[in-house]
Structure formats: structure tokens, C-alpha cells
Image (cartoon, rainbow, N blue to C red):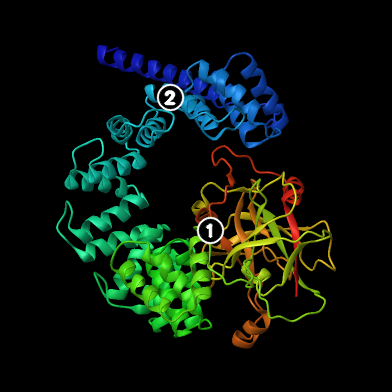
Amino acid sequence: MPLKNIRMCAMGKLFLILLFVAAVGACSETSPPSSKQEATPSPEKRLMELQKQADSGDAEAQYNLGLMYSEGDGVPKNAAKAVEWYQKAAAQGNEKAQYNLGWMYYFGEGVPKNAAKAVEWWQKAAAQGDAKAQYNLGGMYNRGDGVPKDAAKAVEWYQKAAAQGNADAQFSLGFMYAKGEGVPKNAAKAVEWYQKAAAQGNAGAQYRLGMMYEDGEGVPKDAAKAAEWYQKAAAQGNVGAQSMLGMMYRNGKGVPKDAAKAVEWYQKAAAQGNAGAQYRLGIMYHNGEGVPKDTAKAVEWYQKAAAQGNVGAQLGLTVMYDQGEGVPKDWVLAYAWANLAAAQEGKQGRLAKKFRDLYSKYMSSAQRAEAERLSSNWKLGQVLRREGESASGFGNDGESGTLAKKNTGTAFVVSKDGHAITNYHVVADCKELRVQGRIELIQLVTRDEVSDLALLKMPGETRATATLAPYPASLRQGQDIVVFGFPLDSVLSSGGNLTPGVVSAITGLGNNSNQIQITAPIQPGSSGSPVMSKKGQVVGVVSMKLSDAAMAKYTGNLPQNVNFAVSGQTLKAFLDANRVPYKTGWSFLSWEKSLADLGDEARKWTTVVECWK
């Protein structure tokens, strides 16, 4: 046989052998799984396995166990136990545990509150390159919290975190350059860092960039560019940007002049407690710009801003009481508001002084004494009222007679001090508010008609409180939610009703960004009920349902489960504006809970609110 043929034959046999081996190997790799393969372990078994690993010294398991105790996921919530496991993991160098331990000490959860100890643990995590810890350390040095105040040291830590792409640190670094704190003042450098953070969606940086373009600091002056950045920040709920956009639209600066659009943005900022926006909204109602003229509404917004110390609003109330616009004419209150405004510097303060001095010429000594007493006793957050007026906000028409329960709603407790939340429309025009079955009255602290929220103070000792979602803006369309409240209280269960549903839209009626739309059925009495995620964290407050009769008349069809709730963002802004302490849950690695568990928890911090007239 020729050599060539011998070689081909040998190669052919070799190829067949290799093919056979490959086929056998492939068969061995793709053999069918055993029918006895174990199913996915139960949560209880996973917990036992994690506990076993943690007991054997596994740092990651110790960290995860700490996280579970911190959030109450799969185990009873126990902050002290969480700290115990975090410390074991942190001692082995687990940077996530070190970072979380810093937070536990900072907020005093499971351990005594200790800012210096928080700094100590964040330094350990930061030394391992943890960007969040580095950013937090920058903040601690910037505020002098747990360490001596040191702007240069703050900048140093911000730079380390910013170099890793931490958007919050980039924003803070921009702010330090803009103010010249810890570094030489440099507007161009501030813009550079703001842009890095803004490109990652940081709303604060987007707002500040808008200001830089509006004022021409570090960049050429450009009103259109300023409005563009304000729009981006405002869309994320940045209250400063919303207020600035209102002014841009009112003055036609960088955007077409549009009074109605200005009102829209002022309302969003005002609902978050921005005093400047509340004052300007008062002006819009006073002048009838972008809204029908409504002097009573103007007074309402002036009062909100004036209670926060806004000099323009205090001067506005001076004029309203002087002229009797939206309120009865009253020189005592006009003088008192003018006296408060006159204590502030600037053109408006000087004008208020002139008004006050003018009134004093025509007032009796008793009237002046009362006005002086009112203004000297005023505290931040208060609206001035004459003696005999209700400070709680309830009407007083002088009628006598027995009060009767007119309607009920739901409220839920948000602080250990007894602060609770319900809807404004639940408490509007009530003479008294009561908790079902108790004699003591509920105090109405403040209310926000626009957002449909009211802040109450419950009588007696408060133990259980609601937990708010840490990032309500992350709520998604289609997400499961649960409502717990007391609908049709005289008919349905006195133990409360639990109704599941989903988030059908992340905006409300007319694309109102202060609301969300939900499918959970609601009835009279549901108003003020907490809307919870499956993790038990409050993401909204039930507010209203679409009128079946109105929609049937308008469309010829009955709506199906079209209900609305005040958004979690609006709720948190309302609580922040009124300095109410509340707790938020953790967002990462949180476990969803059963409907039964959600009901058991919510029942501890919800109650029926009775409106008596």
C-alpha cells in the first residue's frame, strides 16, 4: 500500500477514536439528573444552614445573619442581635459589616448612640476602599460629628469616594469647591464635580448645576441650560429645583412664560414644605396668576410660609389682615405679623417696620400690648392667632350643643412621640378628634390640604410605629402592595381589614406626582390607611377613589378599582418639613412577609380616627 494511503488510513482511525472519546465524554457530562435530586431548601432550612456557617466563623454568613436580625427578615427583629453578628464579621475584616456597624452606632440601634464609634467603624471600612464609608467619613468631618470639624479632612475623604465614582461624594466635593471649604474656592472645579454626579442622576448636583448656569458661575450664563438642569432635578422630586422652575416659568426665564406651569411647580415644592414656594404660591392666588384669584387660599399659603419664618409671607399676611382680604380685618394680627417681619433684615423687613409704626398710631394701648405679646411669644412653626381662636386648627362657630360622630378614617403611628398620619379630608372641619373607644382627644398638629395629609398627636404611650420605605421613589408599576385600615367601621371588622393589590400607576389623577394609583379596594373609612410593600414598609397613604357615579356619567362605564394614595415621597417630605422623627427600613436583602404577618404588624400601629362635629 502506498505510504500516502497508509497515512490517510491511520489518520482516519485516529479521528474515529477521538470522535468516540469525545462522544463518551460528552455523554458523561450531560447525563440526566437524578430523580432523587433535593428540592430547593425551605427558608427554615436555609436559616439553619446560615446559622451553622456563622457559628463556624464564616464572616459572610455572620454579616448576613446580622442583616436578617436588623431587618426582621426570617427572624424576629432584634437590633442588639444584629450588632452582635455584625461585630463578629467586622472583627474578621468584613467591610460590609463594618459599614453597617457604623450606622448602628450612629443611629443608636442595638447599641448606645455614639458618633465617635460610628466614625471608628467607618474608618475601618473606608481603609478597605468602601466608597460609602469614605463618603460618610467626609460628612462626619464636614459637620464635626464624632470627630473635630475639619473641612480639609472632609475633602480628602470625599475625594477618595468620588474617585471611585460615588455620586454623593462627587456632589459634596462640588459643593466644597463652590463654597471654598477645605479647598480654594473654584467655581469651574465645582461645575466639573457637579457634572460627574449629575451624569449619574444625582438630583442635588443637577439642581446646583442649574444654579451655576443661571448665575454664570464656572460656566457661561445660560438660562435655558439652567432650566434644563432644574427640570432633571425637579422630575426626581428635588424641592429646590421645583421652586426655581416655578420662578423660571413665572418670569419666562429660559422657558416660555407660563403662569399655570409656574403654579404647578410651586405646588409640588410647597407640598414638600418649601417656604419660598409656599409664599410665591400665595402671591399667585392673591393676584390670580395661573389660578383663579382666591384670597382665602392666598392666606393659607402665606400662613404656611410665615410659620417657617419667611419674611415675604409675614409681610403678605400683614397686608391681608390690614385690608381684610381672605381673613377678617384685624389690625392686632396685622401689627403682630409686621412686628415679626420687621425683625428681619432687607427691603421687606424695612417695609414691615413702616407698616407696624403706622398701625401703632391708630391702635389703643391694649391692642398694641396684645400684638406685642403675640409676636414675642411666637415660635417657629406657629401661626399667630387671637385669644379665643382655636390653635388646633378646628373651627369654632360659637354654637353650643352635643357633638356627634360624623365620620371615621384610619390613622397610623409614625413616631415614638405619638405622631400619627391621616388624610386632611378626614379631619377637615371636625370639632374634636378621638381614638375609637377612648375618652382622650387627639391633637391636630398641622395639615396640608394640597397633599391631603394631616399630622396628629395621639394620647397616651406609644410603643409600635410604622416603618417607612427608605427609597419610596423606587416604587415600580405592577409592584404588589397591601392596604390595612378600618373601612365601613360600623359594619365591617373592628379588627381592621387587609386588602392586597398592585401599584397600577406611579402618578395619580391628572399625572399628579404627589400620588400613586393602586388597585386595592377602598371604602369610606379607608382614608388615611397605610399602603405597604410586601416587606411591611409604608409606601403611601390611601387618599381617594375615583367616583363611580361621576365616571359612569362621563364615560358610560364604571371604573374598576381605580384608587389613589399619597406617595411615600410626599409623606416623607411632609414629616421632614414638620421635624417628625420616623424610622425607615432597610432596602437591600429584605424579605417579603406573608399577608398574615403584615396584618399582625399593621394592627399594632393603626387605629380608627373619629371626627366629631
Q: How many residues crowd around disc 2 within 10 Å: few (fewer than 14), some, or many (20 or more)?
A: many
Specify the quadrant of the image occupied by residue 179: top left
* Residue 341 on image: x %, y %: 39, 66
Label 1 with label 2: CB-CB less than 8 Å: no
Which of the numbered marks, if any, corresponds to residue 125? 2
- The kind of residue on which mark 2 rests is Ala
Q: Is residue 511 visible?
A: no
Residue at the outermost left position: 220
* Residue 37 on image: x %, y %: 68, 27
At x 63%, y 75%, the residue is: 546
Q: Relative to 106, say whether 298 is above or below.
A: below
Q: How many residues crowd around disc 1 within 10 Å: few (fewer than 14), some, or many (20 or more)?
A: many
Q: In which quarter of the image is the C terminus?
A: bottom right
Q: Relative to 360, say whether 31 is above or below.
A: above
**Front-lying residue, 19 or 78:** 78
**258 left or right of 217 in image:** right
